Image: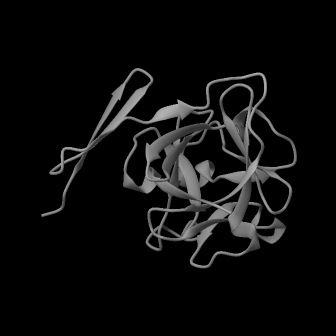
Amino acid sequence: MRKSTLILLLGSMLMVMASGCGDIVTPTATPIPSSTPPAPIKIAIQSFHGRYVTARGENSDWVLGQTPELGDCEWFTQHRLDNGKIALVTCHDRYVTAPITGTVRSDWLLGQELELGDCGQFDLYELGDDRVAFKTCAGNFFTAGDEYWEPPLQWTVVAETDIFGGWEIFTILEQ
C-alpha cells in the first residue's frame, strides 16, 4: 500500500503531515524583508526524482530541465531580495522565470529571461533537511516532471499546480 501525504493549506500557512509517522513540517516563506539582504549563494536544486535542475540554452528555448549529472548549468545563484522573495540566476546570466497564465502543461514551462521581473521572484518555502518548495507569481509551485510526461516535456520543470505534493519538493545543495 502506498503512503499518502495529507496537505493542508490554511491561509498563507502550509502544513505537510506525512501519514504514518506523524511528523509535521510547517514551512515558512523566507526571508523576512530587511534593508540589507544576505549575499548571493551558489546552489544546485535536486528534484524529487533525484535529478538536478538544469538551465538549458538557446537551442532548447531557454527552458529548465533535469539531468542526472551535476555540471556547470546545474548551479544557480540564489539572490534573497528585499521583498522577502528569491531570484535565481542561471549559468547563462539569465533569471529563472515562471509564466503567469496557461491552459496546458507546456504553457507552464519555467524559462529564463535577461531581466528580473515579477515572475522571476519566488516565495521559498523551507521544509527542513534542505528540502524546499518554490511558489511563483501565479501562485503555483515548481513541479519536476519525469520520463513519462509527453514529449518534449520529459524531465522538464513546470509551475502548473497550486497543489503541493512530492513532485513539488526539491533539495538544495550549497556549493
Left or right, 25 with respect to 119, comes to: left
In percent of width and height, residue 118 lies at 74, 32
Q: Residue at x 60, y 48 (%)?
A: 108
* Closer to us: 106 or 118: 118
Left or right, 137 with respect to 14, comes to: right
In percent of width and height, residue 5 lies at 25, 48
Placement of 157 over or under 103, stated as above or below: below
Q: Residue at x 53, y 53 (%)?
A: 105
Most distant residue in the left direction = 1
Number of numbered labels in the structure image: 0
Please identify the quadrant where the C terminus is shown: bottom right
Please identify the quadrant where the N terminus is shown: bottom left
Most distant residue in the bottom direction = 69
Left or right, 115 with respect to 141, comes to: right
In percent of width and height, residue 74 lies at 69, 67
Placement of 109 over or under 149, stated as above or below: above
Placement of 115 over or under 1, stated as above or below: above
* Closer to us: 130 or 61: 130
In percent of width and height, residue 24 lies at 28, 39
Snapshot colouring: one colour
Placement of 105 over or under 25, stated as above or below: below
Res 98 → quadrant? top right
Res 153 → quadrant? bottom right
Q: Residue at x 40, y 40 (%)?
A: 163
Res 117 → quadrant? top right
Left or right, 4 with respect to 45, comes to: left
* Closer to us: 57 or 132: 132
